[in-house]
Image (cartoon, helix red, strand yellow):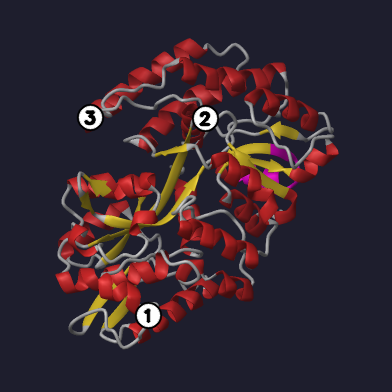
């Protein structure tokens, strides 16, 4: 998941660094061999969403270059790029479909995919993906997002999971080894106390508790401990559990017993980013792209930060985006879409993975996202390309890559934003009231969540 604001910002950031791919048998080889092998039997034009806006000139230039290169390889296909931002707007989605203005190849968040499939608002592309060269190498947990039974309804563009972002510079100042970040929550507590002990204004561990971000991070911590947000059928809350209680008890202890979380609470997305960028925050839960945001927008420096796996994680909240195809698209358009998505999103060394170009443009290279292939051969190839063209210290993310390799990724729950808003309450309570009753807070949240889930079932 992401909080509403963070969803938009991350989608923007990712839109600047990622794109998609797909192909039929002749098309996938054509992209790598003969430009004369057209990807469509007759001239066809496909509209494609999420072109970077003009306000992001480097990313826009890269996109336009890729469109030109693709059309040279496939002269019968024309890409009609659409740069509406945000790339998907739930308020206008239905109207665009009904009015016939939805792109042939439209952008989606992971959290919307199942609803779109259930509503019949995306084409079944199963007959057209056989030639997508690396389809079988994509992470099974990522591809499962776009599947319903044996049918496939889309292809991924980005995939990320949560970890522990930490300030390496503060670790050194506090006598901690930045190359050996915490692996357990007990180690997080000890590190946070040492960082808070550096002086006034230093916060060892920061956490959200407002604007739906508190509930979002509750879910991330809950998944890490092996808990569930909802029952398997999605109809009942499941977070009032020993794992859910442990999340809140840990935060309450760090806040009031350890005094390592600072007095200022009710923090939202931008607050922790600003604190991390200002060099006063030691640790926070987050995906690797947090470091990029802190560097780009909050005056941080890449070399000062590291990311490791979520402590003791049994699973990790993940998120991302991809592309689906308009159900009204003709077979010719779908074939062309597969070729474009493979070219732009899924091929090491080109499209979103053209790291040589990104380096030449001065864009950051080296963050371990997107993670579409895991340890499969294309994933290893992409990792080597990142290292070869790195402009940020890749070794700062090694603990995350190594520690997350075997952690199961899990999607956000249904009605995620409503549940996150409900769970902001217990998160804020344990961080602002020393006498907060965790059992009552979880029971109250469970009752409210069950009403929300009942309405969606």
For the point 23% across and 26% down, the residue is 454
Q: Point out residue 348 in the picture as x, y percentages from the top left corner.
A: 48, 66
For the point 16% across and 60% down, the residue is 98
Q: How many angstroms separate mark 3 from mark 1 (CA)?
A: 46 Å
* SS state under label 3: helix
Q: Which residue is mark 1?
A: 70
Where 244 falls versus 123 (above or below)? above
Mark 3 / mark 1, whichever is N-terminal: 1
| Magenta residue check for 276 | yes
Mark 1 / mark 2, whichever is N-terminal: 1
**Residue in front for this viewpoint, 74 or 375:** 375
Q: Nearer the viewer, mark 2 or mark 3?
A: 2
Q: Is 367 placed left or right of 12 in the picture?
A: right
Q: Are marks 3 and 1 in contact (CB under 8 Å)?
A: no
The mark found on residue 455 in the picture is 3
Q: Point out residue 197 in the picture as x, y percentages from the top left corner.
A: 82, 29
Where 276 falls versus 24 (above or below)? above
Q: Point out residue 50 in the picture as x, y percentages from the top left corner.
A: 38, 66
Q: How many angstroms separate mark 1 from mark 2 (CA)?
A: 42 Å
Q: Is 206 placed left or right of 153 in the picture?
A: right
- The reply to whether residue 333 is in sight is yes
Outermost front residue: 377
* SS state under label 2: helix
Residue range in magenta is 270-282
């Amino acid at each position: 998941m992401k909080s509403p604001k963070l969803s938009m910002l991350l989608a923007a950031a990712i839109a600047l660094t990622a794109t998609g791919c797909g192909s039929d048998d002749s098309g996938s080889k054509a992209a790598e061999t003969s430009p004369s092998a057209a990807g469509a039997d007759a001239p066809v034009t496909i509209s494609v969403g999420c072109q970077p806006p003009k306000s992001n000139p480097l990313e826009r230039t890269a996109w336009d270059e890729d469109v030109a290169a693709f059309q040279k390889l496939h002269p019968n296909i024309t890409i009609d790029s659409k740069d509406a931002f945000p790339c998907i707007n739930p308020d206008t989605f239905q109207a665009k479909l009904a009015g016939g203005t939805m792109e042939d190849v439209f952008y989606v968040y992971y959290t919307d995919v199942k609803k779109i499939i259930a509503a019949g608002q995306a084409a079944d592309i199963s007959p057209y993906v056989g030639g997508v060269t690396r389809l079988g190498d994509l992470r099974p947990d990522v591809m499962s997002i776009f599947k319903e039974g044996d049918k496939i309804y889309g292809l991924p563009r980005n995939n990320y999971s949560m970890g522990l972002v930490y300030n390496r510079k503060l670790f050194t100042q506090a006598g901690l080894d930045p190359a050996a970040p915490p692996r357990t929550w007990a180690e997080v507590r000890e590190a946070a106390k040492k960082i808070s002990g550096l002086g006034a204004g230093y916060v060892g561990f920061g956490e959200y508790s407002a604007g739906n971000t508190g509930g979002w991070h509750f879910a991330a911590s809950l998944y890490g401990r092996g808990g569930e947000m909802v029952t398997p059928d999605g109809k009942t809350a499941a977070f009032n559990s020993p794992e859910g209680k442990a999340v809140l008890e840990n935060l309450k202890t760090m806040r009031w017993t350890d005094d390592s979380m600072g007095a200022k609470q009710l923090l939202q997305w931008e607050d922790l980013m600003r604190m991390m960028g200002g060099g006063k925050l030691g640790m926070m839960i987050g995906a690797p792209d947090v470091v990029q945001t802190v560097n780009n927008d909050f005056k941080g420096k890449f070399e000062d930060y590291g990311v490791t796996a979520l402590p003791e994680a049994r699973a990790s909240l993940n998120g991302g985006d991809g592309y689906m195809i308009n159900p009204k698209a003709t077979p010719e358009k779908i074939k062309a879409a597969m070729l474009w998505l493979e070219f732009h999103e899924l091929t090491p060394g080109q499209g979103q993975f053209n790291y040589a170009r990104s380096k030449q443009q001065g864009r950051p290279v080296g963050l371990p996202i997107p993670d579409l292939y895991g340890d499969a051969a294309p994933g290893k190839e992409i990792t080597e390309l990142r290292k070869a063209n790195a402009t940020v210290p890749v070794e700062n993310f090694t603990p995350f890559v190594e520690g997350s390799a075997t952690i199961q990724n899990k999607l956000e729950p249904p009605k995620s934003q409503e549940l996150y808003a409900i769970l902001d309450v217990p998160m804020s309570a344990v961080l602002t009231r020393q006498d907060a009753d965790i059992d009552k807070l979880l029971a109250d949240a469970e009752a409210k969540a069950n009403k929300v889930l009942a309405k969606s079932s």
